[in-house]
Image (spheres, rainbow, N blue to C red):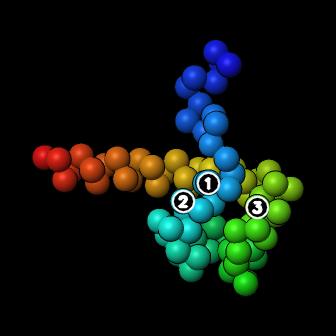
Amino acid sequence: MENQKNNPLHGVKLADIVEHLVVYYGWEDLGSRINIKCFNENPSIKSSLTFLRKTPWAREKVEGLYLKSLRDIAKKSKIIEN
């Protein structure tokens, strides 16, 4: 557990990541940012999770975009505070 304290994805479920991205970007923008079939053709959380659990390279891209979206949210909230 000690070695995971600096991992921002530790404890975050893949389903929560995909749901966050869909809310933040929407399916269309998400599909243009990460061009995979489960985001572009009849997208659903379920089909996306099935694909991402079996495809490490796609999961890495999704996790990277999730972290980027969190940084963007943090930047926006700092601008609003100032």
Amino acid type at circle 2 is: His
Whether tag 3 and tag 1 are in contact, CB under 8 A, the answer is no
Residue found at the far right of this picture: 54
State left or right for residue 73 relative to residue 10.
Answer: left
Residue identified by numbered label 2? 20
Q: Secondary structure at mark 2?
A: helix
User: Given contact means CB atoms under 8 Å apart, are the residues at marks 2 and 3 in contact?
Assistant: no
Whether residue 32 is visible, yes or no, is no
Q: In the rendered structure, which disc, 3 or 1, sits on the residue that comes first in sequence? A: 1
Q: Which residue is mark 3?
A: 49
Q: Does residue 40 appear in this view?
A: yes
On residue 16, which mark appears? 1
- Residue at 63% across, 34% down: 10
Element at badge 3?
helix
Q: Quadrant of the N terminus?
A: top right
Question: Disc 1 residue type?
Answer: Asp
Are the residues tagged 1 and 2 within 8 Å (C-beta)?
yes
- Residue 14 lies, in percent from the top left, at 69, 51
Q: CA distance from mark 3 to mark 1?
A: 10 Å
Residue at point 72%, 53% (across, down): 59
Disc 1 crowd rating (10 Å Cα; few below 14, some 14-19, many 20+) is few
